[in-house]
Amino acid sequence: MLGPETARDRSQGGPREGSFVKTALAVAHKDLLVELRAKEILLAMAFFAAVVVLLFAFAFTHEGRANTDATAGILWIAVALAGTLGLSRAFEREREGDTLRALLLAPAPRSAIYVGKLAGIVLLMLVTEACTVPLVSLLFDAPLLAAERLPHLWLLLVLGTVGYAAVGSLFGALLARTRGRDILLGILLYPIIVPVLIAGARGTEALLARPLDRATAWFWTELLLVFDTVFITVALWVYEPLMASE
Amino acid sequence: MKRGGLFLALVAVTALGLAVVPSLIINAPTEPTMGFIQRIFYYHVATAWLTFLSAFVCAGASIGYLANVGSKSAQRWDGLAMAAAELTVVFGTCMLVTGPLWGRKAWGVWWVWKDVRLMTALLLWFIFVAYLLVRRFGGPGSARLGAGLGIFAAADVPLIYTSVFFWRTQHPKATVVTSLDPGILLPFLLALATFTVLYVVLLWLRMGLETARIRLEDLQLAAEDAGLLDEMR
């Protein structure tokens, strides 16, 4: 058990101060490499997101046509649900090998480890979204793939995913050490990320509007940026003391 | 015994308030446009204020806990955070019950989505129910998790508020207080004060309970180490 002084000493000075980016990249690289070899999380997330979209399509079908009003919300909810699956599996993997402890014992700033985990999860979620967007577009007859809307949609998705994963990787790491982690992640995560979901879904809705409502979409994009900043700042600030000692 | 005296004084003030304020509320003039239903306002505003106050007390205590992790005072901070989180849920439930009762009469509906105050309050309540679930079922390590959650909850309130703000609100503004009839204002302020003192009393009691629980656990561990519990078996 590390006392508070020891924990504080570890975070200060030493040769690792300049290696923040390097550490973060190394952690993200490790996570992606493991995932590329196993392909377990990616396949599970992408398929799960597809199943969720299909469920929505079945639930909202009227007279043979899918209800198109809810498209934006469906896309974001599918992403959020699939994200929880990926998050819990990613940290379960760390827990099984007790590698999270090893990571935290490494002579590196803990916030860099957090940023690395965050980057890894964001990338996995973005790949999932790349599969989900065409499916939603197809099933709900939404112009998500149109050239004037697609880049902006991706901007929204990237910002939304970063905000989601910023909260998710913090609580995923904390939950990895507690009992009942499987049931608690969703309960914790969803109420907190509601602002991100609202901004993402509103922005996407504006993009789907005919004619395209560019001003509103930009407004929500900027708001998402603010939310991401707040989430990441708070998470970076609390990560070190929260993960400090057993 | 100074602390004990202060506590008794607070209990006495609460008892006095709970005895006197209801009769003041009954005798307050009926608000002309809303009628009798306006009287729920004495409870609703007080509980809503305490819900948000308590959420921020929990966040403050969580920060105190994180700043003192590992030392003896961390347990006290944690006890305070726990007590505040429970009271957030208690007063939040009162707020969420009295609000729709009023809304049904005044707006004709129980609940309005897209309303910034309603959504913020509801999500805050959800986050703190999650907090209690974590503390109840999380086992070891849940104190840290709770601290993270408490801080995130407070940081999240302005974000939820902003994200829903751009829909629109029909909830009465807080500035309505300045335009109140003096006959309504006095019982309103007294109700607010009574509830706030009640809150402090409850927080105090719950913290004491938590401290006693932690002490009992420590004693049990010490007794186990000393082999006393084995002999009893």
Image (cartoon, grey):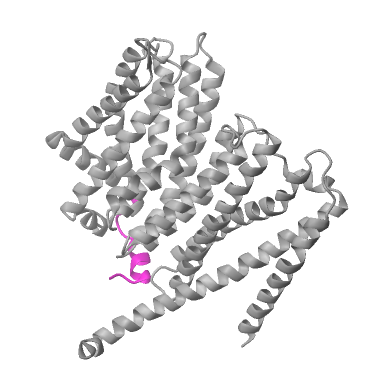
- A89 vs B59: above or below: above
Image coords of residue B138 (percent x, y): 33, 59
Image coords of residue B101 (percent x, y): 64, 43
- A210 vs A123: above or below: above
- Left/right of residue B13 with respect to residue B181 in the rendered view: left
- A106 vs B198: above or below: above
**Residue at horizontal 51%, vertical 70%?**
B206
**Quadrant of residue B212 in the image?**
bottom left
Q: Quadrant of the C terminus of chain B?
A: bottom left
**B175 in magenta:** no
Image coords of residue A147 (percent x, y): 39, 10
Q: Quadrant of the N terminus of chain B?
A: bottom right
**Residue at horizontal 53%, vertical 51%?**
B154
- Residue B1 or B29: which is nearer the viewer? B29
Q: Is residue B73 visible?
A: no
**A4 in magenta:** yes
Q: Which residues are magenta?
A: A1-18
Q: Is residue B54 visible?
A: yes
- Residue A232 or B111: which is nearer the viewer? B111
Image coords of residue B98 (percent x, y): 63, 48
**Residue at horizontal 20%, vertical 42%?**
A30
Q: Residue furthest right?
A: B182
**Residue at horizontal 48%, vertical 61%?**
B62
- B90 vs B100: above or below: below
**Quadrant of residue A157 in the image?**
top left
